Image (cartoon, grey):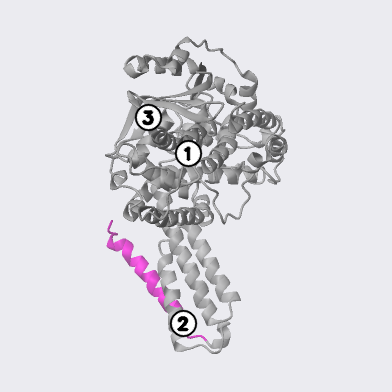
């Protein structure tokens, strides 16, 4: 947008005045400038140009960035002795100032007026967590859809769902322990039992939100810039390194120089038993002396070979619990092989299941400034989680154009209808399915066994320390820390090689493309972070107490529990 003449003139006057000030500065005697006596005309001219450029850039800087830049320049002129060091330091200050200005524009486009603080009624997490989808409602949906699919007439799993009598368990103790304090600000004297006096200006709603939402937490600009400085670059380097290596390995694969072998029957079973997709477990039955477990996904999202998002009525997978191997699978009326099932299950993990954890975690954060000094660790974790949800939901789709140019994904992923974002939305909208029967898998799943036991520990300790967590739902905090980090851990352990995903498949190859990129660039830990992110050695009474007990169950898994969403 063009500026009016009346607005341009003052800026030109400021710039002209600044240029004169720079001229007078560089015409001062050498001894008054604290610089090396061996200055050259070229060095003076270069420094002068840099100085003038910085001042010209200042005319439109936000106050936060302006303060940083002024401090950087004053520090440089006062403490730096050589001209070369001054030039280098000013160049760094100028570069970061430009970067901060670019970050500010991204923040301005996405946050003010579009996201709201959690104490604002327009924020989804102002209200309580939405109810999960009940087991009865989910079973009814499955049965209704199966009636229109002839392929499911003799399906043992559907028969088991139809004849199962759901035992209603009212876990009131866990709900009470996980319940949040409906205020964001801690009381001046916060008791650990959670009985706080709520401040009206920081109060939260009493009713329940209609749906989950992955990216809605308002983050102020200083926190946004901090994340783009100390998290964003390292996350970028992770996927840049991963995709670069992937390009090279795909080239070797096409040349026939490498050919990774995969046991798809075992991998398909692992993606169900050893990840959060285990919540889709429905029933067990005996078949030829085999102990079979069935997993059912109603309204299952997938992307076809035209890069269009589709929704299947039912996707079912049966595995042998004793051998932990794939038995059979069906996608509506089609029979699915183990290799195809791996692609479908991996895509569902990254595009529909895992995003539910991200979305639910927003009810377990508190970025309010009132936490400073009271629980700085929680506030920083909350900022990290909110920003990673922004990176993963709002920013992620923009990277697809880069990967398409590299030949890692098809151009169809960059279409205006954004099939990946559609999958995200579908997964989040479908919410969490009630999974009371999942305890039956504890004997066969390391992940399920650990998660069930640690959840009880987590909620018990949360009740004791609730006063330190105003506005935080204990269940959401558990999901956004323990479950989310372990889902990533098992994703990395289960799918050992991205090339196991078959991009040449005529029906499901497009999903394998994105699946490969996510595996190499967004599953493992981010290196280079300066702050602590684990339960282990956190120095916080709540996280330390949970870790101490969890490590007695499974130390390796406990060591991988993160205190925020940071991958």
Which image quadrant is residue 457 in? Answer: top right
Secondary structure mostly seen in magenta is helix
**Viewer-proximal residue among 33 and 316:** 316
Instruction: Confirm whether the magenta stretch covers residue 543.
Output: no
Can the viewer see residue 183 in this picture?
A: no
Point out which mark residue 336 bears: 3
Q: Residue at x 55, y 49 (%)?
A: 525
**Viewer-proximal residue among 6 and 285:** 285
**Viewer-proximal residue among 532 and 286:** 286
The 10 Å Cα crowd at callout 2, few under 14, some 14 to 19, many 20 or more, is: few
Residue 312 screen position, x and y as percent: 34, 27
Q: Residue at x 43, y 83 (%)?
A: 45
Question: Which residue matches tag 2?
Answer: 24
First in sequence: mark 2 vs mark 1: 2
Q: Residue at x 52, y 67 (%)?
A: 70
- Residue 185 left/right relative to 404: right
Question: Which residue matches tag 1?
Answer: 263
Point out which mark residue 399 bears: none
Instruction: Give the tally of numbered discs.
Output: 3
Q: Residue at x 63, y 45 (%)?
A: 534
Residue 403 screen position, x and y as percent: 36, 52
Of all residues shown, which one is farthest toward the front? Answer: 288
Instruction: Confirm whether the magenta stretch covers residue 15.
Output: yes
Residue 560 screen position, x and y as percent: 62, 43
**Viewer-proximal residue among 80 and 547:** 547
Residue 555 screen position, x and y as percent: 68, 40
Magenta segment boundaries in residue numbering: 1-28
First in sequence: mark 1 vs mark 3: 1
Disc 2 to disc 1: CB gap under 8 Å: no
Closer mark to the observer between disc 2 and disc 3: 3
Disc 1 to disc 3: CB gap under 8 Å: no
């Amino acid at each position: 947008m063009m500026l009016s003449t009346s607005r341009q003139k003052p800026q030109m006057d400021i710039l002209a005045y600044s240029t004169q000030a720079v001229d007078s500065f560089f015409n001062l005697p050498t001894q008054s400038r604290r610089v090396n006596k061996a200055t050259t005309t070229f060095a003076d001219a270069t420094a002068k140009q840099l100085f003038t450029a910085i001042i010209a850039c200042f005319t439109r800087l936000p106050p936060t960035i302006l303060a940083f830049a002024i401090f950087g320049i004053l520090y440089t002129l006062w403490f730096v002795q050589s001209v070369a060091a001054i030039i280098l330091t000013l160049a760094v200050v100028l570069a970061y100032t430009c970067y901060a200005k670019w970050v500010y524009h991204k923040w301005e486009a996405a946050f003010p007026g579009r996201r709201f603080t959690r104490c604002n009624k327009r924020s989804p997490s102002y209200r309580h967590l939405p109810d999960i989808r009940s087991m009865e409602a989910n079973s009814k949906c499955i049965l209704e859809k199966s009636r229109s699919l002839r392929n499911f007439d003799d399906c043992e799993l559907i028969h088991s769902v139809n004849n199962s009598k759901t035992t209603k368990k009212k876990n009131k103790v866990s709900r009470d322990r996980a319940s949040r304090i409906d205020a964001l600000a801690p009381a001046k004297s916060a008791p650990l039992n959670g009985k706080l006096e709520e401040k009206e200006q920081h109060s939260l709603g009493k009713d329940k939100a209609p749906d989950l939402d992955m990216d809605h937490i308002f983050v102020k600009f200083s926190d946004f810039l901090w994340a783009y400085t100390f998290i964003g670059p390292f996350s970028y380097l992770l996927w840049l390194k991963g995709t670069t290596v992937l390009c090279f390995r795909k080239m070797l694969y096409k040349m026939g120089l490498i050919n990774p072998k995969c046991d798809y029957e075992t991998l398909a079973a692992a993606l169900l038993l050893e990840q959060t997709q285990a919540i889709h477990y429905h029933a067990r039955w005996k078949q030829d002396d085999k102990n079979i477990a069935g997993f059912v996904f109603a309204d299952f999202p997938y992307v076809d070979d035209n890069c269009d998002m589709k929704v299947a009525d039912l996707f079912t997978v049966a595995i042998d619990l004793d051998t932990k191997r794939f038995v059979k699978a069906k996608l509506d009326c089609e029979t699915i092989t183990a290799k195809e099932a791996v692609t479908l299950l991996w895509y569902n993990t990254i595009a529909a299941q895992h995003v539910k954890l991200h979305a639910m975690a927003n009810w377990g954060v508190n970025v309010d400034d009132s936490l400073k000094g009271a629980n700085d660790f929680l506030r920083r974790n909350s900022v990290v989680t909110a920003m990673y949800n922004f990176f993963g939901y709002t920013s992620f789709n923009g990277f697809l154009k880069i990967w398409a140019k590299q030949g890692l994904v098809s151009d169809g992923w960059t279409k205006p209808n954004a099939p990946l974002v559609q999958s995200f939305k579908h997964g989040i909208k479908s919410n969490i399915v009630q999974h009371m029967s999942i305890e039956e898998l504890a004997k066969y799943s390391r992940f399920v066994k650990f998660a069930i036991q640690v959840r009880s520990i987590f909620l018990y300790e949360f009740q004791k320390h609730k006063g330190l967590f105003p506005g935080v739902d204990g269940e959401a905090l558990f999901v956004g820390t323990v479950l989310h980090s372990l889902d990533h851990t098992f994703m990395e352990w289960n799918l050992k090689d991205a090339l196991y995903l078959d991009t040449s498949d005529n029906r499901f190859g497009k999903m394998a493309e994105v699946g490969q990129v996510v595996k190499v660039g967004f599953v493992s830990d981010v290196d280079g972070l300066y702050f602590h992110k684990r339960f282990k050695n956190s120095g916080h009474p709540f996280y330390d107490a949970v870790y101490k007990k969890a490590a007695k169950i499974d130390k390796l898994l406990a060591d991988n529990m993160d205190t925020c969403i940071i991958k």
